[in-house]
Amino acid sequence: MAETVMLDASAPGPRVHAAGTLASPTGTAGQRLHLAVLRMAGRLAVLLEELAPASPEPAFLRSMAEEAGTGGIDGSVLDLPAAAAAQPVDRVAACLGLDALDLDLLVLAALPGEREGLAAVVRTLHPEHRPAVTGGLAAALAGAGLIGALPRSSTPTGRRETVRERLTSGLLGRSGLVRLDRAVPFAEAAIVPGPAVWEALRGEDLWPDGCRPRALPFTTAGLARWAGTGTALAAREAFRLLEPVVAVTCSARPDAAAARMAMLAQLAGRPARVLRHAPAAPGWLARIALHALARGVIPVVLPDDTEHLDAGLDAVPWPVALCLAGETPIRSWPRPLIEIPVPPLGLADRRAAAEALFPELPGGEPPVRAPVSGP
């Protein structure tokens, strides 16, 4: 019978790169996560050898794991990042304070989607033959000491309970990184990555359903006076420091206000992404914040309607900008809410912006005039 290996490390805590640790030599974010999945297949092989030594699955899973080599020195299947090459998963782990167990559970949830052979194996373990890992399987891996670098002093039952707590009420679920099917008992509940989360962590430009990235022309020219006054200055500083605020504009021209907010982020030294979204359900803004965190951008969101504007961002500490078409109540507690007026720019500022955006226009007076209303 195969030997069960206990992974041991120091007390659980946020996973960060430290001088002197082994760093990942791999290239892209997708390659690094794929190797982590293959290492997880090796951990699963050890468990299956204990439970069903005569089955062919363990040998198949071990053959996959041989491609990946060893994982991180903290016991996780995900190797540590290079100091100067933080990838989406590293940004998320550092911001949310994820430890080796959280990361292993995230990789485990994504395992069936990485290779068709892995999906086939997982189907044989699911009570309804679905290609999805269950809470019971995650708990069994933890109980055997195969994931999460839980201390040797803990008992199998204690490790299983820790996994249950992480999946039902921990940061993984509250942040939207992982979803747990709560309609069935925990042992049979499917564990899957949140909408398009795994793709975002792989570096793919895929956002949740209903979220449409927009390309708006913008420039910082002509905005210095507006960006340096009142709440605009407060939001700019919050963006620079990546403070978890909700910056809101209410304007008859939300697209123009969104361009201004993107420029405000740029003036703060942060990239921005303008997104139009149709809020389909509560929690939509938190999902956008999580995707923006993975990409390291400030999300500037244009909602198609004003339903479900309860921000619900307490588990994703990342700044968000909302550009509304009118006065709409929004609850951001416990986040600071910064309401930013977007008055019309003066003629000189509008000319500076037009010259920067359209340098191909002939010399002389740019075709702009002082507006009566609007941004």
Image (cartoon, rainbow, N blue to C red):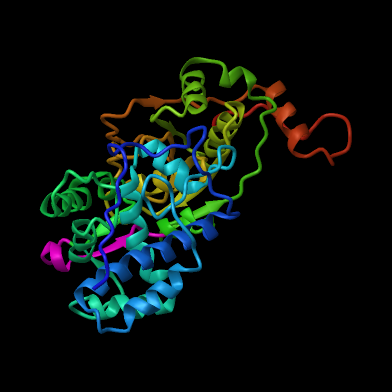
Extreme residue toward the right, this view:
363
Extreme residue toward the top, this view:
229
* Image quarter in which the N terminus is found: bottom left
Q: In which quarter of the image is residue 247?
A: top left
- The x and y percentages for residue 50 are 22, 72
Number of numbered discs on residues: 0
Q: In this view, does 350 lie to the left or right of 152?
A: right
For the point 39% across and 79% down, the residue is: 60
* Residue 349 can be seen, yes or no: yes
Q: Is 326 situated above or below 348?
A: below
- The x and y percentages for residue 191 are 26, 62
Residue toward you, 372 or 302: 302
Q: Is 234 situated above or below 221?
A: above
- The x and y percentages for residue 308 are 28, 47
Q: Is 350 situated above or below 63?
A: above
Q: Is residue 224 left or right of residue 136?
A: right
Residue toward you, 59 or 311: 59
Query: Is 71 one of the magenta-colored residues?
Result: no
Q: Is residue 341 left or right of residue 107?
A: right
- The x and y percentages for residue 99 are 33, 42
For the point 40% across and 36% down, the residue is: 95
* Image quarter in which the C terminus is found: top right
* Residue 183 can be seen, yes or no: no
Q: Is 135 situated above or below 279?
A: below
- Report the span colored magenta: 182-196
Query: Is 192 one of the magenta-colored residues?
Result: yes
For the point 12% across and 67% down, the residue is: 184
Residue toward you, 17 or 318: 17
